[in-house]
Amino acid sequence: MNKITMRLQADHLILEALKEDISSEDVSTNAVMKEAAAGEVDLICKQDGIIAGLEVFGRVFELLDPDTKTEFYCKDGDEVKAGQLMGKVRGDIRVLLSGERTALNYLQRMSGIATYTHSVAELLKGGRTKLLDTRKTTPNMRIFEKYAVRVGGGYNHRYNLSDGVLLKDNHIGAAGGVARAVKMAKEYAPFVRKIEVEVENLDMVREAVEAGADIIMLDNMSPDEMREALRIIDGRAETECSGNVTKENIARLTELGVDYISSGALTHSASILDISMKNLHAVC
């Protein structure tokens, strides 16, 4: 995540997270630190995984005090090991204490997503199918979570509702059918936007192909149904399959030859990576 993106898209979210944690003051820190004092603390990984969110971690402290300095001994996307010293943070001890939990929350969450995504992406390695995330993200965390998916080796589906046309079951119901929904989307959406249609059975597949959908999402179909759907589509649209896809069950989809597999689990079910700030001490 570059500094321009950080300032434009992430800073206000990080500030809101800090305000959530410090509504008026940090009582504990102010009780033991009456005035500014320079300090340093270690950033230590306590679990094997893929690290993601180091710049966000550092930005938390910078927003509290621009004089805070972070030094990292690894970069986003690196494999890290339990016990590894990943970096140091230097600055006013009050800032290090007050920003610790917010900074770690971002780093642990993003690294957990990157780690889980990496483990799923490895199962698709060597094939043509790309692993996608979804919009099933934590409110106000989407920019961070989707970035973490990319770090872990996955790809981003649309970022939000303004990003592309995806006609799901309720859109199709509201429009009165697949063909009518696609026709209306083609009339409304800019020509540069692809139109994706979610289908649940083979009749809907046929209708989506005939209507000229650019991408057809095979939702919650059996492997046999998806094979038949791919035969019907026959290269006339890109293909995506979805529906409760996890690391444990993705193997049933890997041999189908679809263009994309999307998984909400990448963001909504990943565990955090255990990371800690330790050995805080004063420096001259």
Image (spheres, helix red, strand yellow):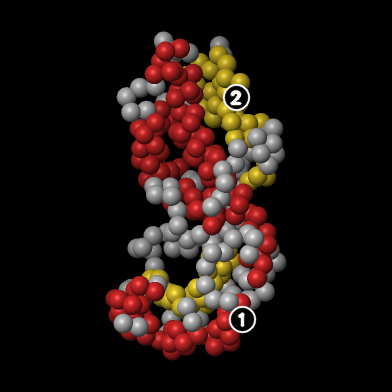
Residue bearing the label numbered 1: 224
How far is mark 1 from mark 2, CA to CA? Answer: 53 Å
Q: Taking 241 as reference, is 232 above or below it? A: below
Residue under the point 45% across and 57% down: 136
Q: Taking 250 as reference, is 225 above or below it? A: below
- In front of the other: 110 or 58: 110
Q: Position of residue 16 (x, y in %)?
A: 35, 37
Residue 130 located left or right of residue 59: right
Residue under the point 52% across and 68% down: 243
- Name the element at disc 1: helix
Residue under the point 45% across and 53% down: 137
Residue bearing the label numbered 2: 278
Q: Residues within 10 Å of mark 1 (few under 14, many from 20)?
A: few
Q: Position of residue 155 (x, y in %)?
A: 54, 60
Q: Nearer the viewer, mark 1 or mark 2?
A: 1
Q: How many marks?
A: 2
Residue 228 located left or right of residue 157: right
Q: Position of residue 273 (x, y in %)?
A: 60, 41
- Name the element at disc 2: strand
Q: Is residue 53 visible?
A: no
Residue under the point 59% across and 60% down: 246
